[in-house]
């Protein structure tokens, strides 16, 4: 008999919220849920530019965890909205450290999915002594091959209908460099074109991250303010390859050797090919690796969610 799939903990409200001035004109919104003084953890959202939502608070047993969730620079409730100034991977790594100091803990569990896994790896490889455990989902190491696969050629072959809509705002003569073509429009002066491109960029992701179509989930990616921050920030990061050296995160995975962890990845994850999760698991043998059959990219996929909850329970000492 198989175990019942684990799912979210009940809805919960933060017991504390705030805005942290991180310099450079940026203020970062943060919230704290669970039990003050319990096992410390930080949740890193995806995108970049995705922001946090109430559902993500429910990935941790509130009796056993004290969790900080925050909107990364320029998105969600952080200000200024959709700003690209002083907004890089390394600014965010420094912000995570500021939040750790604010929380008053020496170490914490770091949880990140998709772009959040990229940021978690960058943080953990920079500050391994600050990480008690890592829970990573939908591994993205931000190499040129991964970016080309999603925005140029690869996923285009799986979703030709959706890719055609993604290409539509870009003239044919510029489609050989889709990220650069979108960059020009997302940072341009034409507000209507900027919004149209933001919606198209955002919807391409929203429609390709679940194994099966989920219109209720993907439609949220089209909302103007969300789409603008999401598309501008994500494109900004990806055009600059996350300010990472090519292959850096896998190259430096040896720095994780003393950190227990869990890697969870959907077999049919379109944005983030499973190869890179596989490579990370080989480079970081202390981590448990779960390749989830019948799952795409999103953390809402039942098999992925089950393993995420099992991981946070296990690291809190709960069977």
Image: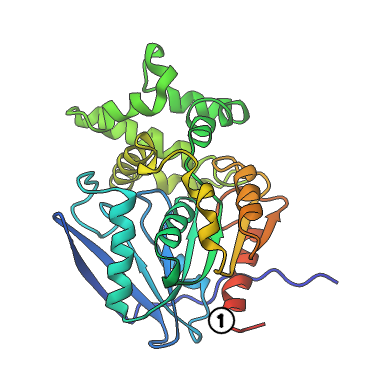
Depth check, front residue: 3 or 247: 247
Q: Quadrant of the C terminus?
A: bottom right
Residue on which disc 1 sits: 316
Which quadrant would residue 318 be assigned to in this image? Answer: bottom right
Does the image show residue 212?
no
Q: Residue at x 20, y 56 (%)?
A: 79
Residue 131 in sight in this render: yes
> What is the secondary structure assignment of the residue under circle 1?
loop
- Provide residue 42's location: percent of width, then percent of height: 41, 70
Q: Where is residue 81 in the image (x, y as percent from the top left)?
A: 22, 50
Q: Which residue is drawn at 51% across and 27% down?
A: 163
Q: In which quarter of the image is the N terminus?
A: bottom right
Disc 1: CA contacts within 10 A as few (<14), some (14-19) or many (>=20): some
Which color scheme did the rendering employ for the protein? rainbow
In the image: residue 114, left or right of residue 233: right
In the rendering, at what x and y percent does residue 245 appear?
A: 41, 41
**What residue occupies the far right of the structure in this picture?**
1
Residue found farthest to the top: 173
Q: In which quarter of the image is residue 306?
A: bottom right
Q: Nearer the viewer, residue 227 or 187?
A: 187
Is 253 situated above or below 215?
below
């Amino acid at each position: 008999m198989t175990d019942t799939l684990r799912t979210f903990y009940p809805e919960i409200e933060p017991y504390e919220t705030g805005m942290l001035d991180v310099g450079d004109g940026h203020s970062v919104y943060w919230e704290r849920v669970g039990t003050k003084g319990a096992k410390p953890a930080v949740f890193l959202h995806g995108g970049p530019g995705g922001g946090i939502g109430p559902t993500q608070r429910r990935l941790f047993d509130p009796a056993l965890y004290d969790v900080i969730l925050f909107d990364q620079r320029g998105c969600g409730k952080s200000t200024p909205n959709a700003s690209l100034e002083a907004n890089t991977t390394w600014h965010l790594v420094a912000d995570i450290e500021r939040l750790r100091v604010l929380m008053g803990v020496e170490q914490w569990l770091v949880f990140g999915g998709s772009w959040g896994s990229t940021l978690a790896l960058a943080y953990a490889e920079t500050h391994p002594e600050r990480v008690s455990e890592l829970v990573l989902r939908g591994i993205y190491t931000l190499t040129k091959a991964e970016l080309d696969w999603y925005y140029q050629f690869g996923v285009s072959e799986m979703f030709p209908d959706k890719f055609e809509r993604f290409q539509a705002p870009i003239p044919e003569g510029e489609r050989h460099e889709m990220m650069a073509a979108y960059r020009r429009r997302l940072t341009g002066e034409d507000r209507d074109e900027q919004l149209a491109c933001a919606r198209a960029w955002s919807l391409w992701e929203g429609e390709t991250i679940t194994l099966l179509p989920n219109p209720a989930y993907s439609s949220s990616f089209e909302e103007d303010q969300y789409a603008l921050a999401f598309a501008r920030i994500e494109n900004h990061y990806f055009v600059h390859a996350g300010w990472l050296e090519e292959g850096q995160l896998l190259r430096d995975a040896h720095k994780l050797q003393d950190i227990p962890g869990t890697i969870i990845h959907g077999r049919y994850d379109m944005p983030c090919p499973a190869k890179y999760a596989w490579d990370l698991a080989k480079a970081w043998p202390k981590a448990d690796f779960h390749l989830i059959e019948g799952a795409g990219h999103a953390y809402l996929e039942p098999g992925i969610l089950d393993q995420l909850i099992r991981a946070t329970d296990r690291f809190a000492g709960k069977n």
